Amino acid sequence: MAHRILKNAIILSSTQVFSRILSFTFFLILARYFGSEFFGKYYYVYTLIFLLTFISDLGLSTLLIRDIAKLKERAGNILLHSVIIRIFFSILVYSALVITIYFQPDLDVDKKNLIYLLGFYVFSKALFEYSLNYFQGVEKQGIYGLLLLLNNILLVVITLFFIYGRTNFIIFSIIPVIATLVSATVGFYLVNQQVSFKFKILFGDLIFLIKRTIPFGLTLFVSAASARMGIIMISLLSTDIQVGQYGVANRLIEGIMILPIIINKITYPLLSNLKNNPLKFQWTLETANKVLLLCTSVIVIVCNIYAEDIITILFTNLYIDAVIVFQVLCWMLLGSFPNYIIGHALFSIDKQREVLKISGLMLFINIYFNFILIPKFGIIGVALTAVFTVAVTFIGYLRILKQYYKIMDIFKNWVKITMLCIIIVSVGLFLRSVIPEIVTALCLISLYCFGIYFFKLISEQEITKFKLFLTQKGM
């Protein structure tokens, strides 16, 4: 098992890192090419459509990965019924979207046209998930990663082609649709080479699958809405330029989220199989969270100290207002990283209803605080709200987990690493103003290593145990 996990980690790391870089490049090109106002319009519409894909998916992605991992022999039947459900709900979602937008005469014309075209992404994304879920469930991470890589290569290539042809701004909204449809077609072909389908559709199986997946769907939609509601509300309460400024900072944060996503692709099927083995379940969860938090600490420190350089080099001085937003959002990662793993761990032990309750509360808090803070503080208020809701979500997840497993080590590590980040960021910002950059970097590296030792974040026993985990098949 351990060798399989290590192999999956290497494959996923390589393919998904390249995929994320390409996905980020897509938005980077748009941001630099269109400027903050038009990019703000595009990013608002993209965020809205992205949220709607969670409704058309209905949580099937999470459920299917778990079910296929356990019932590989029934994969064909599960996939066939799932794609019917996805197409049906995609039609409902797109129809409702078009009707709603059509009867809003005051809505910006550019946004309307973007929504009409980019709305087809609801269909293409639903079809693409069909093959992605299968290859994740059967642990063929190489094919899964290559499909994602293909999708993001197409995104960048088509974007560059459109820019070269000086295509109208609105037409750019069709790029994700084309890229995902082509990738979905390739995915369908690959799945059909490995799965034998009996084209027998049972209405009872459709209803049963919908009933099982609704809690997952609601939970994932509410969680996604809570995380992205700030962008929607900036568009309603502020300007497209502000959406663009917040969008580049937020896109950087989403790019950094590749780390917990990679770890989760490996640990989620594993945790699903270990839910009846509390000791291994707890050790796997604790180890994953500690690794993530240590990685997060480095990212938080570097991004806070060098935020201005990162933003201006990538997006030019036009997005200078995004610097402070980016610095604030970086602190959110200390909660977002563990939340991603813990949330899916709760899914694996069938606690999605509890996760839904927390997500619903966070969505309400997010909307409430944004209404208060956006008029006063603008996009900084959105960033502060995001950090607060992520922290509260982390505490809520731990309270649920505490009922079944010991969680004190997870919380202690989180407190220690947060303190370490605060200390080093404070020292780093001060040192940059008084001594040369290279000396500052050396001082911070030394301070970080001392902090790891002082807070006892890594022990020899943990290193030995982790090595045994990687070398023993029976672990």
Image: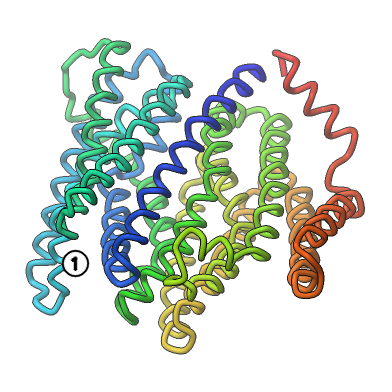
Q: Is residue 463 left or right of 397 when viewed as pictured? A: right
Q: Nearer the viewer, residue 41 or 287?
A: 41
Looking at the image, can residue 70 be seen?
no
Question: Foreground: 403 or 156?
Answer: 156
The 10 Å Cα crowd at callout 1, few under 14, some 14 to 19, many 20 or more, is some
Q: Nearer the viewer, residue 299 or 402?
A: 299
| Quadrant where the image shows the C terminus | top right
Residue 152's spot in the image, x, y percent?
A: 35, 38
The location of residue 288, given as percent across then percent down, is 67, 39
* Residue at left offset 34%, top offset 17%: 74
Q: In the rendered image, which quarter is residue 38 located in?
A: bottom left
Query: In terms of image quadrants, where is residue 423?
Result: bottom right
> Measured from the top left, where is residue 176 in percent x and y?
26, 45
Answer left or right for 282 relative to 117.
right
Image: 240 above or below 475: below
- Snapshot colouring: rainbow
- The kind of residue tagged 1 is Lys
What is the x, y in percent for residue 281? 67, 33
Instruction: Report the residue at 56% width, 30% height from top.
Output: 266
Instruction: Establish if 364 lies above or below 414.
Output: below
- Residue at left offset 89%, top offset 33%: 461
Which quarter shows the N terminus? top right
Query: As displayed, is residue 159 above or below residue 99?
Result: above
Number of numbered discs:
1
Above or below, comparing residue 144 to residue 4 in the picture: below
Q: Does residue 147 appear left or right of residue 171 in this picture?
A: right
Q: Left of 397 or right of it: where is 434?
A: right
Q: Quadrant of residue 19?
A: top left
Give the residue displayed 14% in from the left and 53% down from the top. 117
Residue hosting label 1: 111
Is any atom of residue 448 visible in this view? yes
